[in-house]
Image (cartoon, rainbow, N blue to C red):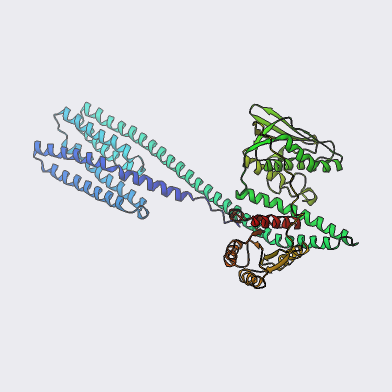
Amino acid sequence: MTGAVPAPPLPDDIDARILREQVDSMMRTSWSGAIAAFVVGLGFWSISWAQTGDRGALLWAALLHSCQLWRYLGCRRYLRTPAAARDAHAAGNWYARALLLNASIWGLAPWLFFPEDSPLVTALMMLVLLGMTTGSIASLAPHRRALLSFPIPVMLGLSSAMLWQGGALELFMGVSALVYLYVNLDFGLQQHRLLTEALRSRYEKEALARQLEEQIEIARRASAERIRFFASASHDLRQPLHSLGLFGTALERRLAGHPAHALAGNLMQCVNALELSFNEMLEVSRLDAGVIVARREPVSVAALCRALDASFGPQAEARGLMLRFRPGAHWISADPALMERLLGNLVHNALKFTANGGVLLAARKRGEQVLIEVWDTGSGIPAAELPRIFDEFYQVGNPERDRARGLGMGLAIVRRLADLMGLQVDVRSRPGRGTLFRLQALACAPAAAQPRVEARPAGHDTGHPGLCVMVIDDEPQVRASTAAVLEQAGMLAVTADGAQQAHAVLQTQADRAQPVDILVCDFRLRGEEDGLALIASLRAAAGRPLPALLITGDTAPDRVQRARASGLPVLYKPVPAEALLGALNAVFSEGDR
């Protein structure tokens, strides 16, 4: 599922990049120094030739300017070469040799141009040569060999010429030139080391950043592959489970009053447990896909507690546990359905891990926040386990994966729901004493009173017997089980395995004067067929907006988003028979209006 971890870059690679940067920098900064050297050299030989008429000055000038032209052409050729084709090692060595030759020519200047009877001109020449040496240190510091190639010949030529003259002043100036050379070289080598280490640190950080990006990409691909794997596995497992649930319901109803009815009831209990597990995984997928949108409105904490008491009170009573609520008169800004689901998961989790005592849900106000706390007297959570309790499939103290204790998805859903609504969830626990989950929600003013409307349980009244329902699914068991449930409810069920057969059935039913009233279509059909496109084509063929219900076992985030964006009612496999009949009733009733 994951690619091989790339090896870190070899030192040689970094060294090569450092050398390239050093040579490039030296080549780019050589222009200003070359111009200054040309002007100074021109002044040297012009003044000397004008004063003495010595043709040796012209020979020195020819050597100097030829060397400068050679350096200019070489630098220009290097800088015009594409970066990928540059040979930094060869270019650096060439430039060092060119500098050595150029410096040797400058080292001859004190021997050729020093006047014997003009200390002022001698001092001026020394100042010029010392200035050139100092200036070269800054421009040549990136490249060690070049750094040594220029100052040493120049200063040795100057110092030797001064010492050769033998006077006290000349001896002092010659020794001073050597000291000056040492100080400048020491400074230049320190600069070279600092620049090199700075480049090395930079390239090592870049290499680490690239490795981090590669690791992030590997993790991203692994996560995407994991999602695709679980979505595919979930789809393949949901298909037979969906059929099993529908067949089981049909069998349980048919065996009503028969001695074997208890067996059918046990079968349905197992099916319901499996459906609960799959629905938890589906909810995580839907939250990850971003298809669940939280809406904010004033929510009464007391109303939430009444709903939770109705859901979990009997369970707590059956286990001899106390389930208490102290909601106060607080109102919070949240999504009521998502908030009930979040708190329900916390209460369910607390009851599951509490053997004695009970669970308390209490609310209190702190500033602009309402703190909703779920306390239990259960087994508690070790401190080392706390960072992982919101991970998927993680359960404290259940290494054997006892299915009776759930899948470990409840708190993962809590974290996602809290993030979706922008709420903060904290947890504190003491092993053997119990656990506290604290939720921070924004307080708000109470909502205006609304008239109460009694809701009818979905699925208990289809209200439309005799409907002709086309069931489209590429799985024969799904078609058969769905048809069995529909026929038990008094409907006419016709089936198709894909687009071609669906169009044929649509035409056949129209010819029989018993047209299809509603479509029940799987999202992903055989091959490249798509349930959304098929529904659109069947509506076009029928010449009317046929009511349609989309059923899918896909939990991949992109498919969940597509299903939600279609605007069609969507059910996620496995679908209980009552939920299917209730959805059909709602869809057809909406179509009638």
Left or right, 265 with reference to 490: right
Quarter where residue 461 is shown:
bottom right
Residue at 72 percent of width and 30 percent of height: 329
Q: Nearer the viewer, residue 370 or 146?
A: 370
Quarter where residue 318 is shown:
top right
Q: Is residue 272 positioned above or below 170 on the image?
A: below
Quadrant in which the N terminus is drawn: bottom right
Quarter where residue 128 is shown:
top left
Q: Nearer the viewer, residue 250 or 33?
A: 250
Q: Position of residue 494 (x, y in %)?
A: 70, 68
Residue at 84 percent of width and 57 percent of height: 266
Report the number of numbered marks.
0
Quadrant in which the C terminus is drawn: bottom right
Residue at 24 percent of width and 50 percent of height: 73
Left or right, 498 with reference to 78: right
In this view, which residue lies farthest toward the right?
259
Left or right, 65 with reference to 347: left
Q: Position of residue 561 (x, y in %)?
A: 59, 53
Q: Position of residue 485 (x, y in %)?
A: 76, 62
Q: Is residue 328 visible?
A: yes
Left or right, 40 with reference to 145: left
Q: Position of residue 216 (x, y in %)?
A: 55, 49
Q: Is residue 571 visible?
A: no
